[in-house]
């Protein structure tokens, strides 16, 4: 093949340009840590990476929902534990009624009044400015004193439930409701009084020294205690369910992030080795160009 | 048999021929780095010989040589390679010019990994879900409003920048069409000069080279290819209609509108379809690809507005009002915006299915759009990802095709250079040969002169 000087110059320029381009690509990979920085470098990969990032965002959302549900349920469980403790104290007070010492009964009645106030306080628990047990009426306390006195408190929530999605098509009710906990308006058993009315009756019976009335109130307090304990068990089961879901989400998220990393992250070791190789190739191209230009008949004229 | 004067004439012919050959090699060396130059060679031919005395030349032929002459100065050139090169100039021009606006469009739609439209939609759904979990939280409502405003702003800016790219391409297309007209005029002028030179029996080598350079650029611009490329009667066709006919050039006129670009020829006043060369690549990007991206963006924006608004209208704000839009209704990517009520007060965000402040059911319904198949059988996020894949695929196709055409063009250019390119070594060798032949011819003249001197000076002295 006949070789002209323009061919040599063109081959040198093209060789240098190609070596330079490969060097640039390798530098770009090492600097960014990404296998491809733009969709045009790997259109299919870019689409898959965007879909995986979207999947990661969705799972992260479910993860945060789990955390939110866990917070709500743990606060609920704490309130239930405190209310059950209070009801247990009320039951003990009823059992401690003295048939002879009315002054002691008065003291027990005072204690029952304090217990009722503590139960109201627990039912009015708020987190981040929102009442937890008022359904969707989160800006007002769930219980308001009844001007008529009987029952002593009125429920002013709406029994709305907060259901948080933990996966596609899977939700968990993460809220508890004061009406259900305390049987306000007969929410749990229409045939029974609410817990605060029961405590009021117990307090009144103790002050009156009415043994029969105290026994009747004791039976009602026991029912409320068992009801709250049952709710606590239900809440514990929900907590366990959410914790399991959280674990599954952690695993799913790890898998998805690994896939995303494999797809979009550059293999740095390989990229650095390639960068070195391309540097050497570039230097070789420059050296070859220099050698080609030195070999000419002009040297002998 | 040639006499002494004949020998002097013979030497003179050699001196003349080799001086001309030397000039041709010098011309080659002078143009060794000139782009598009085809090397030339002086074709030396022996002069017709003289017949033997008394013999009929027609019967026996010449017996005594009469020297040498430059028969012609030949342009070393291969037409087939030139035609091939032009075809690849047109292909390379089409894909590389088309890639320029697509690269800009890619930077608009995919500024960086994780900052594309799909990621912004994810942030929006996430914000809706946060509000659904705590609808009474004004901070979360403000975050939702900011995320929605950022998405709307990105959609608007993307649509706007795509329109700007499209508009700026008009300038590029217009400049190229003007260049086509200028080149057509120059080629027609060259045709006239070549015709004249050839009619006068002169070699028009340098004119042919200059015209070839113009033809290469012309095909790279619009894919126009010539027929009968050697002579002065060259005809160049574009979309089946002549652009240049010998010494006559027909001009192209461009009119650009929203519907597309129309190019008409002065040959018959009808429009020509330019699908190759830089103009073809830019037209395809301007009138097919970029409008496709804008349409996809509009589809995403319009569906987002309609679906969110439909759910939002049924919900209640923290102020107890219902029936309000979240986005301004009826828009597309170019004018998507939050409704004035939502912009003015985050309490207008209808997160509730009732008038209760802690009810996030309407917000939850909107957040479910993340996984709802509402656009062409897929989710809005999938539509955004498909758009990302589409622009990436289009640009990758352009880049690869341009690189392939460039590689093929390089190969052909190498072959072209192998035939027509100047080798300095080769020219130096021939230069030396011509120089030595010239010196030898001078010696022949000197020898004949000395022989004449013997006859004149010594024979007459007796």
Image: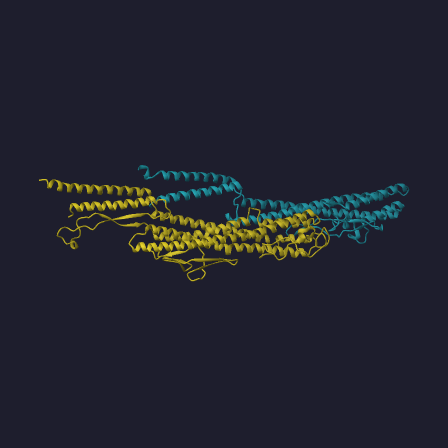
Chain colours: A cyan, B yellow
Residue shown at 85% from the left, 43% from the top: A110
Name the residue at 34% across, 38% down.
A295
Give the total of numbered labels. Answer: 0
Q: Position of residue A263 (x, y in %)?
A: 54, 46
Percent position (x, y) of residue A265? 54, 43
Image quadrant assignment for residue A253: top right
**The one of B307 and B82 positioned closer to us in this rendering:** B82
* Position of residue B446 measured from the top left corner of the image (x, y, whole percent): 19, 41
Q: Which quarter shows the C terminus of chain B?
A: top left
Q: Residue furthest right?
A: A100
- Compare residues B68 and A100 and report the one nearer the observer: B68
Q: Residue furthest top?
A: A300
In percent of width and height, residue B48 lies at: 20, 51
The image quarter in which residue B314 lies: bottom right
Q: Nearer the viewer, residue A74 or A137?
A: A137
Q: Relative to residue A222, is residue B443 drawn left or right?
A: left
**Residue B378 visible in the snapshot:** no
Q: Is residue B265 visible?
A: yes
């Amino acid at each position: 093949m006949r070789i002209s000087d323009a061919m040599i110059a063109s081959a040198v320029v093209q060789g240098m340009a190609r070596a330079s381009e490969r060097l640039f690509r390798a530098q770009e990979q090492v600097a960014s840590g990404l296998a491809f920085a733009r969709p045009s470098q790997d259109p299919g990969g870019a689409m898959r990476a965007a879909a995986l990032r979207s999947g990661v965002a969705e799972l992260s959302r479910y993860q945060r929902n789990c955390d939110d549900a866990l917070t709500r349920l743990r606060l609920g469980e704490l309130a239930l534990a405190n209310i059950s403790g209070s009801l247990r104290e009320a039951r003990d007070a009823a059992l401690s009624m003295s048939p002879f010492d009315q002054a002691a009964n008065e003291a027990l009645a005072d204690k029952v009044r304090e217990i009722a106030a503590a139960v109201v306080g627990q039912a009015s628990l708020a987190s981040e400015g929102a009442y937890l047990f008022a359904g969707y009426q989160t800006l007002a306390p769930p219980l308001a004193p009844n001007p008529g006195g009987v029952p002593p408190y009125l429920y002013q929530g709406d029994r709305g439930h907060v259901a948080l999605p933990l996966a596609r098509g899977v939700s968990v009710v993460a809220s508890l409701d004061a009406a259900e906990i305390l049987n306000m308006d007969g929410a749990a058993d229409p045939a029974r009084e609410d817990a605060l009315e029961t405590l009021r009756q117990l307090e009144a019976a103790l002050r009156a020294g009415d043994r029969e009335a105290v026994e009747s109130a004791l039976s009602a307090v026991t029912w409320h205690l068992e009801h709250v304990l049952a709710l606590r068990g239900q809440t514990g089961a929900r907590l366990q369910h959410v914790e399991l879901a959280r674990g599954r989400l952690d695993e799913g998220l790890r898998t998805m992030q690994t896939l995303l990393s494999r797809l979009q992250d550059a293999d740095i070791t390989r990229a650095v080795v390639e960068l070195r190789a391309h540097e050497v190739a570039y230097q070789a191209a420059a050296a070859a160009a220099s050698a080609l230009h030195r070999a000419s008949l002009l040297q002998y004229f | 048999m040639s006499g002494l004067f004949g020998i002097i004439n013979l030497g003179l012919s050699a001196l003349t021929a080799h001086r001309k050959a030397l000039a041709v090699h010098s011309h080659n060396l002078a143009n060794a780095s000139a782009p598009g130059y085809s090397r030339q060679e002086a074709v030396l031919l022996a002069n017709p010989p003289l017949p033997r005395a008394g013999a009929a030349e027609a019967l026996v032929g010449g017996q005594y040589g009469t020297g040498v002459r430059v028969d012609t100065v030949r342009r070393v050139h291969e037409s087939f390679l030139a035609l091939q090169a032009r075809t690849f100039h047109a292909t390379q021009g089409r894909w590389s010019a088309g890639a320029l606006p697509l690269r800009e469009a890619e930077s608009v739609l995919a500024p960086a990994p994780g900052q594309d439209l799909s990621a912004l939609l994810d942030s929006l759904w996430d914000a809706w879900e946060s509000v659904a979990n705590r609808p009474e939280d004004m901070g979360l409502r403000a975050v939702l409003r900011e995320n929605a405003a950022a998405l709307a702003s990105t959609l608007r800016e993307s649509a706007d920048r795509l329109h700007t790219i499209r508009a700026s391409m008009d300038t590029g297309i217009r400049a190229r069409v003007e260049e086509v007209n200028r080149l057509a005029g120059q080629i027609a002028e060259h045709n006239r000069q070549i015709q004249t030179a050839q009619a006068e029996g002169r070699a028009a080598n340098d004119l042919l080279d200059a015209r070839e350079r113009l033809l290469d650029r012309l095909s790279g611009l619009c894919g126009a290819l010539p027929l009968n490329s050697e002579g002065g009667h060259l005809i160049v066709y574009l979309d089946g209609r002549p652009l240049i006919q010998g010494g006559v050039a027909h001009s192209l006129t461009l009119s650009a509108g929203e519907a597309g670009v129309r190019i008409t020829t002065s040959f018959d006043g009808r429009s020509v379809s330019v699908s190759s060369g830089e103009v073809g690549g830019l037209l395809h990007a301007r009138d097919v690809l970029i409008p496709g991206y804008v349409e996809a963006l509009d589809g995403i924006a319009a569906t987002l507005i309609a679906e969110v608004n439909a759910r939002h209208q049924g919900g209640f704000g923290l102020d107890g009002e219902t029936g309000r839009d979240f986005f301004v209704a009826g828009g597309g990517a170019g004018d998507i915006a939050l409704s004035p009520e939502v912009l003015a007060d985050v309490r207008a965000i209808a997160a509730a299915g009732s008038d209760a402040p802690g009810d996030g059911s309407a917000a939850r319904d909107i957040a479910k759009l993340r996984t709802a198949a509402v656009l062409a059988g897929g989710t809005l996020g999938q539509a955004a990802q498909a758009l990302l894949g589409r622009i990436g695929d289009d640009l990758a196709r352009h880049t690869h095709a341009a690189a392939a055409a460039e590689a093929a063009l390089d190969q052909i250019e190498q072959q072209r250079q192998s035939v027509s390119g100047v080798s300095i070594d080769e020219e130096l060798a021939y230069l030396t040969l011509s120089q030595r032949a010239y010196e030898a011819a001078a010696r022949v003249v000197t020898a004949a002169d000395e022989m004449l001197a013997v006859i004149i000076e010594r024979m007459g002295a007796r």
